[in-house]
Image (cartoon, rainbow, N blue to C red):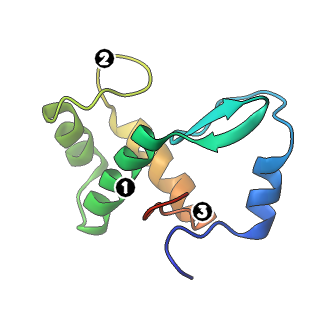
Amino acid sequence: MRQGFVDEETMAKWKTKRKGGATPYGYVVVNGYFEKHPKEQEVVRIIMNLRSRNNSFNAIANHLNCQKIPPRRGDKWEHSTISLIVKRVEKTKDEPKGKI
C-alpha cells in the first residue's frame, strides 16, 4: 500500500458529518468535516519517521519536547499521546508522506 493512502472505508467515515468526539491529531474540523492541518501533518511525519527507526514512544516525545514542538494540548508531549498517534496511523494505513 502506498504511503499517504487512506482506505476508502476510513475516508468515507471521515467525510461524513462530524458528530462529536476528539479530532484526530493532524486534522482540524471545518464546517463539520475533517480537513488536514498542515503543521500537525508535519509533526505526524516526524513521529512516524522516528518510529520507523525504532525509537520508543518516550524517545519520540522527548525529541519533540527538545525541539520545542508544542502538542495540541498541554505543555509537553507524552508517550501516551505518541502511542495513540502511531496506532491510529498504523491502523488506518494513514502514514502521512505528503498527505493524510
Residue sitting farthest toward the top: 75
Q: Crowdedness of circle 3 by 10 Å Cα count: few (<14), some, many (20+)?
A: few
Please give the label number shown on residue 1.
Answer: none
Q: How far apart in space, not on screen, are marks 2 and 3 (Cα)?
A: 27 Å
**Residue displayed at 76% across by 37% down:** 33
Query: Image quarter for residue 19?
Result: top right
Residue at mark 2 to residue at mark 1: CA–CA distance: 21 Å
- In depth, the one of 11 and 74 nearer the eye is 11
Residue found at the far bottom of this picture: 1
Q: On residue 45, which mark appears?
A: 1
- Disc 2, disc 3: CB below 8 Å? no
Q: Please name the residue shown 23% across and 38% down the image.
A: 64
Determine which quarter of the picture holds residue 48.
Answer: bottom left
Q: Amino acid at mark 2?
A: Asp
Label 2: which residue? 75
Question: What residue does disc 3 label?
Answer: 91
Q: Earlier in the sequence, mark 1 or mark 3?
A: 1
Q: Amino acid at mark 1?
A: Arg
